[in-house]
């Protein structure tokens, strides 16, 4: 019988136990396994093509840290791919300053080009002030403005792809949130397809890794940095979705993966993009499904 305390590949002390399939790996083989799973997903789904300029959303947190580290390994065998890390400074006091410093240390190590864009520059104010009288909506507003910020960054730096650090847990939570909201369009929309001539495809290379695997990866790589939690995180529906899925995953292992597979199965049978020419916001001219885009709505430009 195999020793459960040893790596199933090399026989060194095991650092990680993985499921689907079940195996135990040492630190080196776990990091290689995680990277190869991401590489396989990138190639199988054509997330990145030779010659692409990939804008990587780098918050400085655990997910984006793993994303930069893994993509930096990926481009070693794809020298025609260019990475550009972009950090969005929302203007969250006693939070974003520390994560920006973490991002700067990371790009200094990897050698990836790094840019910082702020909400103040793009929208005229910090998130703290924009949500001062509606803190219960802070996460939703921040998400809307962050997406627009990455779109603007992609234009500035001529990016062909926008890569974000969403992991398996994030994806499963989003599915549940969309179902709870009755948000069918968001459930079926596949942003990796892009919309030629209108917005850059958004890819999620880490969607094959769980949050636990990502934390383990950056710890073994020596890049785990304890950071403060966003002060607005407790106001989000996502926190409740995370708790629910966490309970179900513990009781029924494989729940997160099955939730994501369920969504992907729906996408195969339902059009992910609207037919015809998309509409544009009458205020800012950006792509929108309605008369006014969400950015202009949250900034009260439609009043």
Image (cartoon, rainbow, N blue to C red):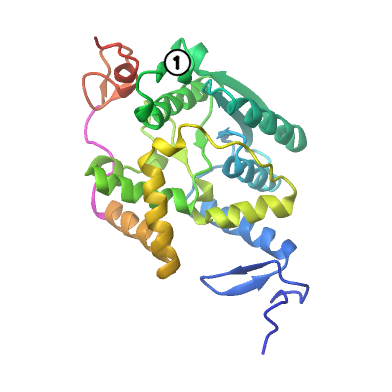
Nearest the camera: 289 or 5? 5
**Residue 220 placed where, x, y %?**
72, 55
For the N terminus, the image quarter is bottom right
Q: How many marks?
A: 1
Q: Magenta stretch containing residue 276, yes or no? A: yes
* Left or right, 85 with reference to 125: right
**Residue 140 placed where, x, y %?**
37, 31
For the C terminus, the image quarter is top left
* Left or right, 163 with reference to 15: left
**Residue 120 placed where, x, y %?**
50, 13
Q: Is residue 112 visible?
A: no
Residue at 34 percent across and 50 percent down: it is: 175
Residue at 74 percent across and 33 percent down: it is: 105
Q: Quadrant of residue 194?
A: top left
Q: In the rendered view, would you say 227 is above or below 297?
A: below
Q: Magenta stretch containing residue 259, yes or no? A: no
Q: Which residue is mark 1?
A: 129
Nearest the camera: 163 or 157? 163
Q: In the rendered view, would you say 180 is above or below 200?
A: below
Badge 1: how crowded within 10 Å, few (<14), some, or many (20+)? few
Most prominent secondary structure in the magenta stretch? Answer: loop
Q: Is residue 113 visible?
A: yes
Q: Residue furthest bottom?
A: 1
* Left or right, 65 with reference to 280: right
Nearest the camera: 17 or 206? 17
Does dot 1 land on a helix, a strand or a loop?
helix
**Residue 131 placed where, x, y %?**
40, 20
Q: Which range is magenta? A: 269-277
Nearest the camera: 210 or 202? 210
* Left or right, 87 with reference to 266: right
Q: Quadrant of residue 244?
A: bottom left
């Amino acid at each position: 019988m195999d020793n459960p305390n040893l790596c199933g590949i090399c026989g060194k002390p095991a650092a990680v136990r993985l499921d689907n399939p079940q195996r135990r790996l040492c630190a080196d083989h776990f990091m290689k396994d995680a990277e190869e799973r991401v590489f396989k997903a990138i190639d199988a789904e054509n997330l990145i093509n030779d010659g692409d300029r990939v804008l990587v959303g780098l918050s400085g947190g655990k997910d984006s840290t793993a994303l930069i580290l893994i993509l930096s390994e990926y481009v070693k065998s794809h020298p025609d791919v260019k990475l550009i890390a972009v950090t969005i400074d929302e203007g969250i006091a006693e939070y974003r300053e520390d994560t920006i410093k973490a991002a700067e240390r990371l790009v200094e190590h990897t050698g990836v080009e790094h840019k910082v864009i702020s909400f103040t520059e793009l929208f005229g104010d910090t998130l703290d002030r924009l949500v001062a009288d509606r803190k219960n909506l802070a996460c939703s507003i921040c998400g809307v403005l962050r997406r627009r910020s990455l779109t603007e960054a992609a234009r500035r730096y001529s990016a062909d792809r926008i890569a974000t650090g969403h992991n398996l847990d994030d994806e499963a939570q989003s599915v549940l949130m969309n179902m709870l909201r009755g948000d069918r369009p968001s459930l079926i929309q596949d942003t990796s397809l892009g919309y030629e001539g209108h917005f850059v495809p958004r890819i999620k290379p880490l969607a094959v890794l769980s949050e636990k695997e990502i934390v383990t990866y950056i710890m073994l790589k020596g890049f785990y940095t304890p950071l403060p939690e966003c002060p607005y995180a407790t106001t989000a529906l996502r926190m409740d979705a995370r708790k629910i899925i966490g309970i179900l995953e513990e009781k029924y292992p494989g729940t997160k993966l099955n939730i994501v597979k369920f969504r992907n199965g729906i996408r195969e049978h339902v059009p992910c993009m609207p037919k015809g020419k998309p509409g544009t916001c009458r205020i800012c001219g950006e792509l929108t499904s309605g008369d006014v885009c969400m950015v202009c709505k949250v900034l009260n430009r439609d009043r």
